[in-house]
């Protein structure tokens, strides 16, 4: 990479410093601007009638009573949108063989999951819209549902899309070496386990929300969006509503949590846009919590049969597994619902040297809500399968779980490497991270303490995970398959007349602190105090084109574009300064908002003097000088499909065998996300991520009945981690910058969620082992723990 | 269904009289009629705590109370706390500790934390966690919030 390698040592850099986020002040004063806070003149409100059954043919819909309610402006059925909205199909060409059926915002003939939107009522208030929605009469002929993913491929299972002949959406097999021969060796110990990962969901505290305004005079659609990928949404709305892309503006201001939930195409959101376009008036839709549980994408839902073979000296001889995952009745548009299974195939065992490997995934349709990408896509499954098998195997051969990792983790000096599944790795530090973890948690002393406590009837356990996390994706993730999802991002930086800079970037902010780190990078590289930087993100009209923030790419990709733009602007400013000061650019630097001599000394000229000279008094400049005080740079990862981070984590739990309750006593995470831009923000990502992982491991599950009803769709029934049950989480860093950028930052947003479940499951099994029990199903509820113990 | 009642109440020091639908909850009234969008709605069934605000000196859930029940009440929302400066040290501690990410839980979380601090709560992490267990935060993992509350209690004890 070209660029200012020395920026990190400059006195005015903010990189590596825990400076507070500018946005935080506003949000503590109730000055946030979330979508539901928007009130527009003549705005209408939408409510939806949703399918009460998991599978049913729509026989008739009668909306006349609903339409007659005073205050109701319009009622739309699925048929009303035919011709108004182009159907969408969630497939990508690089996931060969993936199939899904066309979807419309409201079901047209057949409803395929409980909660699928069927009818939309638009009225002067949400309350009136809901009143009217209750008066819509729908006659549905119930069809047999296929809800259980493990039976969805049976010959007698109801087929959800008749044209496909079965409920198989996608299948992929990955094979390396000769796993059969390796498993058959007579000098290996083979461990087999069946893992179950329940369905859970994002539970963003702010539910999905859209406000859409359409101005027919200009054919201009503006979509205020609580989401992560404005340019992707711009394309989708334009394509499916029949508008030129430039006539769609997508604005994303404050977002109350997203975690991947708000990056997909939801029927009710598209219907809201279509209604605004048809009616020529603004329409607001805010999902209530029931609608969120029923329709926000769910995640996980895998059953994995895994096998590992290890030699007596602890070397992994082979790893194999078979994964079945249920994705609901469609593959989600446009990212598809096959990515999670694909990640599981690619990432299981990735930290280790494994020569012989076989993995198969089958992705099946079922009559439940759709499953798609949520924080740490596929990672919790991949890590729990590999490290679950590894720790069980270690115990089987009588080896310590740290030791067996040391014998199998790819050496820190071995990179670049290619894994059995073809993943390219570089700049990882598994051994260093594990060493740091063991030291931080005082591993040996803790083991000894547990042995002592066990004699007193106190059952504690320790579990670890060594992991990788996919971050900074290149075009190989989505773009290659035809998705309208940018992998490059851009930043424009402008010197203002007052000497401040304005940063505008295509990555987005959902609370991670994206805006803050862009400001830190720009301030340090360009040379102004942090409070002289303003940042704009989340507006397709005013930012460069790009992908947004997902897959832990905001810092690594948006950050590098910002670094390059700041560096470019600095060179441009120094050229102007050199002309004014009658010297050459290399003689100057910019420090604290002033042009200074490169070798030190007092300020020669303030940036505001320079900018005002250019903007107001161009007559003072030579006529052949064309000053440009704005610079734009774009960046994409080109040498690798992804930039991986790595980490090592450990959990300590205490188990009550009487009640089945497990308390997480401690959690430690060592993360190598390359260059750390703001340690406090990174630690916040890791802790928040770990707690979501604890949720998946112990509490969170979307419980469906046999006939496809979601039985716990309230926050009282669907358990999420609350403050009291959560431990303090100790975080440490190993910094191995990626060579793919000058900044050297990899992502950090998902490791906690991806790794914690594996460590927690291993810890519970460590506590259970002396009691002759084990558990490989998440969430590990008290009931399941008691079942594992055989007491219920 | 559309029956209304007229109520008078004082919100953040300003008194107003409004006709409200009898079925409207307090937080919807504050957000939609008075434009006080700082109080958030996360569940509308009393679990998440995003709508927590002060009514007659007690922290309550704005989604579990009807607007008509607030007739004659004194109400303070996050906007009111910010305007009056009450809890300024707590807000500053939230910023310093980055005790918020998306900020959606923050107004309710601040209200519950303020209740703890003003009620003489001690800097005991487990007690703070217990007190805040009616406020859901999906982003932070809670640790930084507990840190912030401890800082404020220590700070007030020193001064
Ligand atoms: S909105 Fe009131 S408690 Fe959730
Ligand atoms: S900061 Fe997002 S929910 Fe708490």
Image: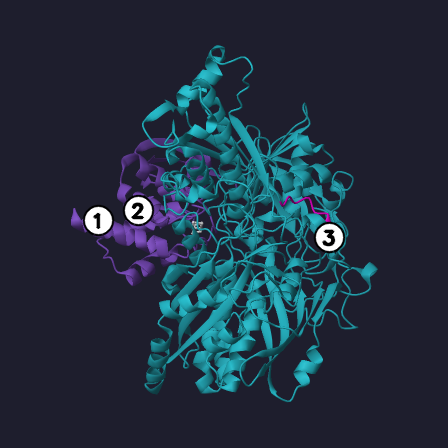
* Residue A192 in magenta stretch: no
Residue A484 falls within the magenta-colored stretch: yes
Label 3 is found on which chain of the structure? Answer: A
Marks 2 and 3, Cα distance to the nearest angstrom? 47 Å
> Label 2: which residue?
B93
Q: Which numbered disc flags the more N-terminal residue, 2 or 1?
A: 2
Percent position (x, y) of residue A451? Answer: 36, 83
Query: In this rendering, do the residues under marks 3 and 1 share a single chain?
Result: no
Is the residue marked by circle 1 packed among few (<14), some (14-19), or many (20+) residues within 10 Å? few
Secondary structure found at label 2: helix
- Image: A83 above or below A309: above
Q: Is residue B124 left or right of residue A518?
A: left
Q: Which residue is mark 1?
A: B155
Mark-to-mark CA distance, 2 and 1: 10 Å
Q: Which residues are magenta?
A: A481-487
Q: Colour of chain A?
A: cyan
- Residue A274 at x, y percent in the picture: 68, 38
Report the front residue among A472 and A192: A472
Q: Nearer the viewer, residue A490 or A604?
A: A604
Distance CA(mark 3)–CA(mark 1): 56 Å
């Amino acid at each position: 990479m070209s660029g200012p390698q020395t920026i990190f040592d400059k006195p005015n850099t903010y990189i590596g410093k825990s400076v507070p986020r500018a946005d935080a002040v506003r949000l503590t004063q109730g000055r946030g601007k979330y979508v539901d806070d928007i009130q527009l003149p003549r705005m209408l409100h939408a409510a939806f009638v949703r399918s009460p059954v998991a599978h049913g043919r729509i026989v008739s819909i009668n909306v006349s009573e609903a339409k007659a309610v005073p205050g109701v402006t319009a009622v739309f059925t699925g048929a009303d949108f035919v011709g108004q909205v182009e159907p969408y199909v969630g497939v990508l060409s690089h996931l060969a063989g993936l199939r899904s059926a066309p979807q419309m915002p409201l079901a047209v003939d057949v409803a395929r999951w409980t909660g699928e939107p069927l009818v939309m009522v638009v009225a002067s208030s949400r309350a009136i819209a809901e009143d009217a929605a209750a008066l819509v009469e729908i006659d549905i002929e119930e069809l047999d549902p296929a809800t259980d993913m493990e039976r969805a491929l049976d010959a007698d299972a109801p087929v959800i899309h008749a044209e496909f002949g079965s409920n198989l959406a996608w299948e992929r097999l990955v094979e390396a070496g000769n796993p059969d021969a390796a498993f058959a060796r007579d000098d290996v110990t083979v461990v087999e386990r069946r893992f179950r990962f329940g369905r859970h969901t994002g539970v963003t505290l702010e539910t999905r929300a859209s406000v859409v305004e359409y101005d027919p005079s200009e054919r201009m659609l503006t979509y205020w969006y609580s989401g992560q990928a404005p340019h992707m949404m711009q394309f989708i709305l334009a394509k499916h509503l029949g508008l030129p892309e430039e006539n769609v503006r997508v604005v994303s201001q404050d977002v109350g949590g997203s975690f991947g939930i708000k990056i997909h195409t939801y029927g009710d959101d598209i219907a809201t846009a279509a209604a605004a376009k048809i009616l020529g008036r603004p329409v607001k839709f805010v999902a209530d919590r029931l609608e969120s549980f029923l329709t926000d994408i769910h995640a996980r839902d895998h059953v994995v049969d895994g096998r590992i073979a290890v030699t007596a000296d602890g070397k992994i001889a082979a790893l194999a597994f078979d994964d079945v995952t249920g994705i609901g009745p469609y593959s989600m548009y446009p990212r598809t619902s096959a990515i999670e299974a694909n990640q599981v195939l690619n990432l299981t065992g990735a930290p280790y040297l494994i020569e012989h490997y076989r993995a198969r995934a089958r992705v099946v349709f079922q009559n439940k809500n759709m499953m798609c990408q949520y924080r740490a896509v596929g990672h919790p499954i991949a890590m729990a399968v590999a490290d679950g098998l590894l720790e069980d195997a270690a115990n089987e051969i009588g080896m310590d779980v740290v030791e067996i990792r040391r014998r199998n983790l790819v050496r820190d000096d071995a990179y670049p490497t290619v894994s059995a599944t073809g993943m390219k790795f570089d700049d990882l530090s598994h051994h260093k991270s594990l060493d740091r973890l063991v030291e931080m948690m005082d591993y040996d002393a803790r083991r000894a303490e547990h042995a002592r406590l066990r004699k007193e009837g106190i059952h504690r356990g320790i579990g670890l995970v060594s992991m990788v996390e996919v971050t900074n994706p290149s075009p190989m993730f989505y773009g290659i398959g035809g998705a309208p999802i940018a992998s490059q991002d851009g930043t424009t930086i402008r010197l203002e007349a007052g000497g401040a800079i304005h940063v505008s970037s295509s990555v987005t902010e959902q609370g991670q602190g994206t805006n803050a780190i862009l400001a830190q990078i720009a301030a340090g590289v360009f040379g102004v105090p942090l409070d002289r930087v303003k940042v704009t993100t989340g507006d397709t009209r005013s930012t460069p084109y790009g992908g947004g923030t997902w897959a832990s790419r905001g810092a690594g990709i948006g950050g590098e574009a910002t670094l390059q733009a700041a560096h470019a602007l600095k060179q441009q400013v120094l050229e102007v300064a050199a002309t004014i000061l009658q010297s050459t650019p290399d003689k100057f630097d910019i420090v604290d908002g002033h042009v200074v001599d490169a070798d030190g000394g007092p300020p020669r000229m303030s940036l505001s003097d320079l900018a005002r000279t250019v903007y107001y008094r161009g007559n003072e400049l030579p006529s052949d000088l064309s000053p440009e005080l704005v610079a734009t740079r774009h960046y994409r990862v080109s040498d690798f499909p992804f930039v991986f981070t790595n980490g090592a984590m450990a959990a300590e739990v205490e188990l009550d065998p009487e009640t089945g309750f497990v308390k997480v006593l401690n959690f430690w995470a060592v993360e190598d996300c390359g260059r750390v831009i703001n340690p406090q923000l990174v630690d916040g990502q890791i802790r928040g991520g770990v707690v979501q992982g604890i949720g998946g491991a112990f509490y969170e599950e979307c419980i469906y009945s046999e006939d496809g009803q979601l039985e716990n769709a309230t926050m009282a029934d669907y358990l999420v981690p609350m403050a009291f049950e959560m431990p303090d989480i100790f975080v440490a860093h190993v910094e191995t910058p990626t060579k793919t950028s000058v900044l050297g930052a990899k992502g950090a947003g998902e490791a906690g969620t991806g790794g914690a479940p594996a460590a927690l499951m291993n810890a519970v099994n460590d506590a259970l082992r002396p009691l002759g029990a084990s558990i490989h199903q998440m969430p590990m509820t008290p009931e399941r723990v008691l079942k594992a113990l055989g007491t219920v | 269904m559309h029956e209304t009642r007229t109520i008078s109440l004082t919100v953040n020091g300003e008194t107003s009289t409004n006709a409200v639908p009898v079925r409207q909850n307090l937080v919807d009234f504050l957000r939609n009629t008075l434009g006080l969008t700082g109080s958030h709605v996360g569940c509308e069934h009393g679990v998440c705590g995003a709508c927590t605000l002060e009514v007659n000196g007690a922290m309550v859930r704005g989604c579990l109370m009807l607007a008509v029940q607030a007739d004659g009440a004194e109400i303070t929302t996050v906007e009111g706390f910010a305007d009056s400066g009450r809890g300024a040290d707590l807000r500053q501690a939230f910023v310093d500790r980055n005790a918020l990410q998306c900020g959606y839980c923050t107004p309710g979380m601040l209200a519950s934390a303020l209740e703890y601090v003003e009620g003489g709560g001690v800097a005991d992490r487990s007690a703070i966690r217990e007190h805040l267990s009616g406020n859901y935060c999906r982003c932070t993992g809670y640790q930084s919030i507990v840190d912030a509350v401890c800082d404020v209690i220590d700070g007030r004890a020193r001064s």
